[in-house]
Image (spheres, rainbow, N blue to C red):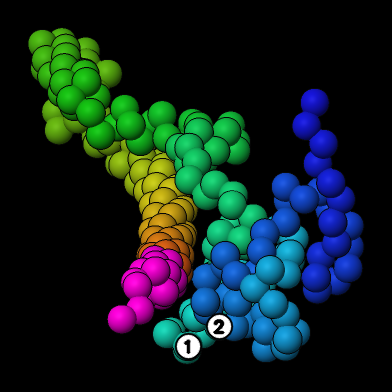
């Protein structure tokens, strides 16, 4: 069993397992500068808890969005929180949307779906044809003789009822589209921010690696110069 020593956060002094702390020097330069603005004098070896780093990461992203866009909305705050806490934003919107439907919503969606299908069109055309042929063949004994006044009343009633049902279904579809657009915006912005921070981190690590290599090369050159025999 591996022992994980307890160390203290260099900022707030709280105790944490060593595995949950990171050296300040390994963070991105922009994040390091933000921490040192509040706590000057911290060395690169100072240990920072993940929760503390996430708190400053949220502040950094908020300042970045305010600077680039001139505003910071509640939607942006959700994105910043998810980035800092490494939460997932993408989800099954269709399942979440349909799970909250009421009985009236389900009825409206079903009727609107059937009313806009070929099955409804062909069935209704067959019904109209049968109605007119039946009454036309019955002659004076027809219950709805030509010009089919009862049929016109039925058609007008169906049109008057069908229109609001279709509008209710369309309004729900618009709500779903707004939810999907909101989710796409959040996911895209979060991906953009994480990619930007990843580039910053990689550039920082490459810069530190080049610096260490340069220091090692300088030491090797000094050792070679010292090992040369003096004339």
Q: Looking at the picture, how far across and down is residue 136, in whole percent? A: 11, 17
SS state under label 1:
helix
Tell me residue 65's x, y (percent). Answer: 49, 79
Q: What residue is drawn where x is 33% and y is 31%?
A: 113
Instruction: Using the image, tell me which numbered label, if any, was put on residue 63.
Output: 2
Q: Quadrant of the N terminus?
A: top right
Percent from the top left, x then y, of residue 20? Answer: 73, 51
What span is in magenta? 213-231
Q: How many marks?
A: 2
Is the magenta region chiefly helix, strand or loop? helix
Q: Residues within 10 Å of mark 1 (few under 14, many from 20)?
A: few
Marking on residue 67: 1
Note whether residue 29 is visible.
yes
User: Residue 10's image quarter?
Assistant: bottom right
Taking the spot 86% from the left edge, 50% from the top edge, the residue there is 6
Q: Is label 2 in a helix, a strand or a loop? A: helix
Q: Are marks 2 and 1 in contact (CB under 8 Å)?
A: yes
CA–CA distance between discs 2 and 1?
A: 6 Å
- The residue under the point 74% across, 64% down is 47
Residue 165 falls left or right of residue 87: left
Q: For the C terminus, which image quadrant?
A: bottom left
Residue sitting at x 59%, y 57%: 82
Compared to 46, does 49 lie above or below?
A: above
Identify the disc placed on residue 106: none
Camera-side residue: 192 or 129? 192
Verify whether residue 180 appears in magenta. Answer: no
Q: Which residue sits furthest front?
A: 231
């Amino acid at each position: 069993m591996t022992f994980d020593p307890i160390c203290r956060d260099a900022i707030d002094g709280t105790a944490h397992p060593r595995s949950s702390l990171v050296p300040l020097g390994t963070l991105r330069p922009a994040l390091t500068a933000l921490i040192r603005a509040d706590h000057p004098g911290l060395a690169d070896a100072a240990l920072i808890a993940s929760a503390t780093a996430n708190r400053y990461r949220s502040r950094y992203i908020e300042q970045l969005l305010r600077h680039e866009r001139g505003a910071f909305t509640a939607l942006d705050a959700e994105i910043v929180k998810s980035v800092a806490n490494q939460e997932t934003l993408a989800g099954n919107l269709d399942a979440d949307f349909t799970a909250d439907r009421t009985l009236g919503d389900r009825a409206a969606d079903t009727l609107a779906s059937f009313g806009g299908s070929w099955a409804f069109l062909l069935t209704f055309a067959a019904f109209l044809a049968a109605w007119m042929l039946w009454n036309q063949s019955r002659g004076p004994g027809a219950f709805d003789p030509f010009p089919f006044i009862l049929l016109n009343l039925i058609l007008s009633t169906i049109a008057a009822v069908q229109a609001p049902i279709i509008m209710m279904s369309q309004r729900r579809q618009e709500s779903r589209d707004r939810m999907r657009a909101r989710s796409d915006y959040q996911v895209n912005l979060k991906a953009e921010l994480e990619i930007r921070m990843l580039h910053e981190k990689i550039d920082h690590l490459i810069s530190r690696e080049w610096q260490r290599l340069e220091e090692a090369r300088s030491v090797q050159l000094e050792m070679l110069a010292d090992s040369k025999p003096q004339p």
